[in-house]
Amino acid sequence: MPETEFLTIDEAASVVNLSKSTLAKLRCRGGGPRYIQTGRKILYRRADLVAWLEAKTFASTSEYNREVA
């Protein structure tokens, strides 16, 4: 079984193409990718980032609108 890859906030922001502050807001409000907090350190699993992005994938705007409603 391959090792789990853990990413820092900077690395995670680069993977999902969001700013660090946007990731911070998503951690506070919810709805963002799963993360790990150990003390003051925040880490993301690459697999969780990919899964979060996959869950945000739509084939058309009508499909997106059904999800949001």
Image (cartoon, rainbow, N blue to C red):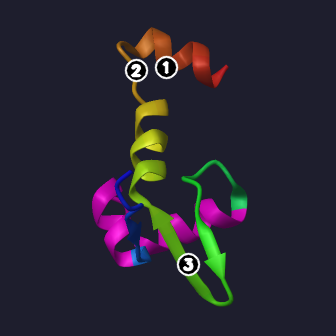
Identity of the residue drawn at 62% across and 25% down: 68
What amino acid is found at the position of numbered circle 1 in the picture?
Answer: Tyr
**Residue at numbered disc 1:** 64
What amino acid is found at the position of numbered circle 2 in the picture?
Answer: Phe
Residue 29 image position (x, y, % from top left): 71, 58
- In the rendered view, would you say 37 is above or below 67? below
Numbered tag placed on residue 42 in the rendering = 3
On screen, residue 69 versus residue 8, left or right, reads right
Where, by quadrant of the figure, is residue 59 drawn? top left
Question: Sequence-wise, which precedes: disc 2 or disc 1?
Answer: 2
**Residue at numbered disc 2:** 58
Boundaries of the magenta span = 10-28
Depth check: 7 or 17 in front? 7
On screen, residue 16 versus residue 63, left or right, reads left
Density class for disc 2 (Cα within 10 Å; few <14, some 14-19, many ≥20) is few
Residue 52 image position (x, y, % from top left): 48, 42
Magenta stretch encompasses residue 14: yes
Secondary structure, mark 2, is: loop
